[in-house]
Structures are given as C-alpha cells and as structure tokens.
Image (cartoon, rainbow, N blue to C red):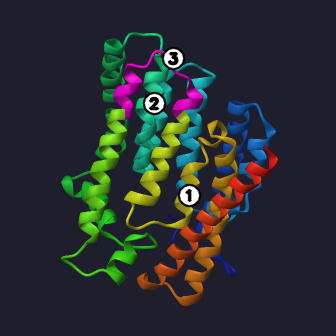
C-alpha cells in the first residue's frame, strides 16, 4: 500500500487500487463472456450497481477472487487444463477460503469418464497440488502457526449475521452462538462430503448441475456459517451465476441490491455491532419477499 502520498484531496493509493479494480472488472466481464458465450451474463455482472459499488468504488479484494475463479473455470471449460484450473482455484482460496468448496466438483467433472476409484485417486492427486499452490504464498512470509489464527479470529467476530439475534434475544445457557455455529458447521460438512461421495459414484456428470450444487453450498456457507457477514461477500455468488437456474439468476442480483439497501440503514444508525440487527432483518425479510414475488410471477407466466 502506498501510504502518505496524496494529490490534492485524492489518496493516490486508493486511486491506484480503484484503477486496478476497474481493470480486474473488465477482465471478469471478458471471461464471463468467453465462458458463457452470452452477452446477457456479461451485462448482468458488468453493469450491476452492486458490483460497481462494492467491487470498484469500495475496492474490495473479492474482485480478485472472482477473477481467479473465472480464470480457473475458463481453463477448465475452454482450455481443458485441470492443472491451471486447480492453481487458480488455490489462488482464489488464498484470498478468500470459501473458494475451496468448488474444488472437488471441478476435479470429478474433469475425470467424469473414469471409474469412481480412479476419480478418488485423481482427487487426492490434484488435492495435493491445490494444497501446495495455496501454501506457497504463505511460506514466503510465514514465521509460525499464528498466521493461521486469522481464520479463527474471523469466525469469532460478530457482524451483520443472524447470529446477532442470538446475542440480543437469547441468553445462555438456553442457546449460544457457539452451539448454533458448531451445529450448522457439522451439518454443512456432512452434507457437503456426502454430496462429494455421491458425485464420485455418479455415472452422468454435467458441469451445469455441479456448478449449481457448488453455488448452493457457497450460499449456505455465506448466510449460515459466517458470523461476521458483510454485504460485499455476495460477490462470491456471481462467478457461477451463468450455470444457475433462471430464478436464481434473477434472485442473486436482487439480493445483492437488497443488501446494499440494508447496509444503508445500518450506516444510517451507526456502525456499532448491535445496529447489524436491522441490517439482518431487512436482508432476510427482503430476500424472502423477493423470492416469493419471483415465484408468484413465475406461476403467472407458466
């Protein structure tokens, strides 16, 4: 970061980061078009006010996660290069660790013509490559195990998640954040690994189906497991958007904009953690309402 350098009222470092994020945004739009061959997905992402606000104006590094995931998917679908796919997924995971969720789906899809036992061996083989690729950037500066403590610290923070309702309206020992988060993590892990085992033994594997499943797991991780939810995390749902069901393709951008509205209410009251409760209420109620409206419109059209 360039510190202490300014030109008038403009922070040079911030300006540089915004320019970089604009470039990344253009690259993401190009990759979405190359992968999907449809302009609608490029426009849905590229002109989305949520992406422009959170990704470019607020310069969040989640834009790089999207970039690395899209490059990985481009290498998978267009170049048929699994090594580069795994390496770029590792780079995405090094920035935001949720990206590892996609890994088994792409490996098993790539070896969909092989038998289940061989698929398992391939998962182990490329899983090792993934771990090496993730570790290399950290090994450049890691001195001790404290570098891994950041993951635990992040999970101990509470911000803008439904866990705030537990703190506010429930008192131990009746229920606690630790109990609920642990239960949901165990349930998520069991369902995720069960899905992977089923996929290992599945005869007909289509990329569209597997990317749907991967995005559902990312949604579950995003809304149920993260205790310190932030609105810009919804950017994570966009790299796999082109493979989702029509109702999800509409709902994901809608929930992104609802989160922006909810965040404006949060900022209006101040940035104290207790003010995250109105944010959560608006986000969840608004998202549920939008889902119901979409379902009603779909029924009328069908």
Nearer-the-camera pick, 110 or 61: 110
Say which residue label 2 marks.
105
Mark 2 Cα-neighbour bin, 10 Å: few <14, some 14–19, many ≥20: many
Q: Earlier in the sequence, mark 3 or mark 2?
A: 2
Q: Earlier in the sequence, mark 2 or mark 1?
A: 2
Quadrant location, the C terminus: top right
Do residues under tags 3 and 1 come within 8 Å of each other at their CB atoms? no
Which residue is at the far bottom? Answer: 269
User: Is 33 situated left or right of 155 in this image?
Assistant: right
Which residue is at the far top? Answer: 114
Above or below residue 270? Residue 215 is: above
Say which residue label 1 marks.
234
Q: Quadrant of residue 111?
A: top left
- Can residue 18 be seen at all in this image of the molecule? no
Image: magenta residue range: 195-210
**Magenta highlight: main SS:** helix
Q: Position of residue 177 (x, y in %)?
A: 29, 70
Q: Position of residue 23 (x, y in %)?
A: 68, 50
Q: Residue at x 47, y 80 (%)?
A: 277
Nearer-the-camera pick, 246 or 18: 246
- Can residue 276 be seen at all in this image of the molecule? yes
Say which residue label 3 marks.
204
Residue 208 magenta-highlighted: yes
Q: Position of residue 69 (x, y in %)?
A: 54, 40
């Amino acid at each position: 970061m360039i510190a202490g350098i300014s030109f008038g009222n403009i922070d040079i470092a911030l300006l540089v980061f915004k320019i970089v994020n604009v470039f990344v945004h253009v690259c993401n739009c190009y990759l979405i078009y190359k992968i999907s061959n449809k302009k609608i997905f490029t426009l849905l992402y590229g002109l989305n006010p949520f992406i422009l606000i959170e990704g470019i104006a607020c310069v969040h590094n989640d834009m790089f996660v999207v970039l690395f995931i899209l490059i990985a998917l481009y290498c998978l679908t267009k170049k048929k290069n699994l090594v580069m796919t795994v390496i770029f997924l590792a780079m995405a995971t090094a920035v935001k660790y949720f990206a590892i969720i996609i890994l088994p789906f792409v490996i098993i899809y790539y070896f969909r013509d092989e038998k289940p036992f061989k698929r398992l061996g391939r998962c182990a083989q490329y899983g090792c490559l993934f771990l090496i690729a993730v570790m290399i950037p950290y090994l450049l500066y890691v001195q001790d195990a404290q570098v891994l403590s950041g993951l635990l610290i992040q999970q101990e923070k509470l911000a803008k998640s439904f866990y705030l309702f537990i703190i506010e309206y429930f008192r131990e020992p009746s229920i606690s954040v630790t109990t609920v988060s642990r239960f949901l993590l165990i349930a998520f892990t069991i369902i995720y690994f069960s899905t992977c085992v089923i996929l290992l033994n599945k005869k007909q594997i289509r990329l569209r189906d597997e990317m749907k499943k991967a995005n559902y797991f990312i949604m579950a991780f995003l809304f149920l497991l993260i205790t310190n939810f932030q609105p810009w995390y919804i950017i994570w749902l966009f790299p796999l958007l082109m493979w989702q069901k029509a109702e999800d393709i509409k709902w994901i951008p809608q929930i992104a904009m609802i989160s922006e509205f909810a965040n404006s209410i949060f900022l209006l009251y101040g940035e104290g953690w207790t003010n995250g409760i109105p944010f959560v209420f608006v986000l969840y109620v608004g998202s549920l309402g939008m889902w119901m409206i979409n379902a009603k419109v779909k029924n009328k059209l069908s």
